[in-house]
Amino acid sequence: MSDRKCDLVIIGGGPAGLAAASAAREAGVKDICILERDKKLGGILNQCIHNGFGLHTFKEELTGPEYAARFIKKVKEQDIPYMLDTMVVDLSADPASGEKLVMAMNKEEGIFTLRAGAVILAMGCRERSRGALNIPGYRPAGIYSAGTAQHYVNIEGRMPGKEVVILGSGDIGLIMARRMTLEGAKVKVVAELMPYSGGLKRNIVQCLNDFDIPLKLSHTVVDIKGKERVEGVTIAEVGPDRKPIPGTEEFYSCDTLLLSCGLLPENELSRQLGVDLSPVTGGPVVDESLETNIPGVFACGNVLHVHDLVDYVSGEAAVAGENAATYLKERAGKAEAAKKEADIRIVTKNGVRYSVPSTIHMEQMADKLTVRFRVGDVYKDKVLCVYLGEDQVSRTAKRVMAPGEMEQVILLKSKLLEIAGGSIDEKHNTLTITIEEK
């Protein structure tokens, strides 16, 4: 088993890993290695052949593969090494040196270990499976996650079925409702457990409304008919307790059930290393530098929290790459330092579910910091407020806020220090993001 050193290891070669690698190289890191378990770079974008990507990053509308190709080209032009068909199987830290030990394997090299000065976690996310949803009934053929169906149709050119019911209104499910329709299938209905959609408003309009596909909110699948192959599903309305209401059952004949019931950040490796994970997002808890509780370990993209736009993934990943470069420069020639306690803790209240980051070190904070978050329900005509201690930082009227759309606030370092009187004290060590009435 070989063992060699590398300044920066990036786990994942999707949009987050590529953008992080490129930014780190531009910031001066020479020894970088991207590890990707798939046979090519680009991650999930390779199967997202619809357009709508790149409006923020490139000011033009691209397909997923086109967007990925821009970053793949950049990484190749920067001569950043990458290894494909390579699975990371273990992640740990050497307490003596502070190096991160990244154990991986592939067919060419077998099992090998990279001793990294810093690591960027960019493993992305996975879909919730049927087993995680506790849907009753037999387990016949014809039940797929929406992402698996997308892979079959867009990559392999195979249709999962002809008559489709979709459970969950996540963006992949909405996009697959349109895709299956365009390929000649009949999408009978999209059922959503929650009283609101989990996808972007534009996808509801373009993928469902434009094709007259019904969306039934507060509904779920209560039974699946068929033993060898799906023959139909029964959906029912659910009450506020999310339990089916007797007497509301409706049967839809179909040969395919697609599941689009949320995404989970892939953090098995993070957990092995001892990274603190958020109980809300399932992703690492990070500070303003996107650094985890483990010094020199950064996280970005969907492994951190599920994004709605890949443009935000790339922007966030670039921040992680730049900060990993700063960490390596400061660490050069020094022993591993203990991680400093944050100056400010970010608290979310009254419908704001979480924030990224969740802590701020004022010394490391840039002049402008973007804090992203999601709300837990649909809020109309409310006010989004930010407080430093008991002093108000900002107050913004919001016409609509919904769980499917990521929100953000921009913090100015100069304003925070001005409010705190020049330095952060005990009265100003908490920043609260909350929803209030007008």
Image (cartoon, rainbow, N blue to C red):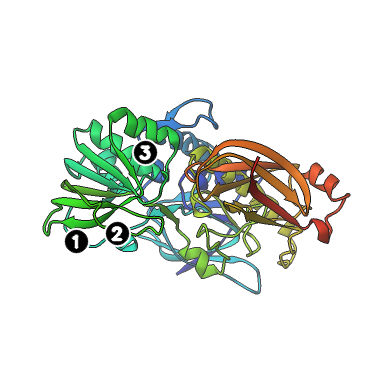
The number of callouts visible is 3
Query: 39 left or right of 27?
Result: left
Judging from the image, what secondary structure is the residue with disc 3 in? loop
Image position, residue 112 (x, y; %) = 46, 65
Q: What amino acid does circle 1 point to? A: Arg
Residue that numbered label 1 is attached to: 139
Measured Cα–Cα span from mark 3 to mark 1: 28 Å
Q: Quadrant of residue 342?
A: bottom right
Q: Amino acid at mark 3?
A: Cys
Which residue is drawn at the image coordinates 22% and 40% (left, top)?
A: 188
Numbered disc 1: secondary structure? loop
Taking depth in this image into account, of 191 and 171 the one nearest to the observer is 191
For the residue labelled by badge 2, is the local secondary structure a helix, a strand or a loop?
helix
Q: Residue at x 42, y 42 (%)?
A: 199
Q: Position of residue 300 (x, y in %)?
A: 55, 51
Contact (CB < 8 A) between labels 1 and 2?
Answer: yes
Which label belongs to residue 48?
A: 3
Which residue is label 2 attached to? Answer: 130
Outermost bottom residue: 96
Label 2 vs 3, first from the N-terminus? 3
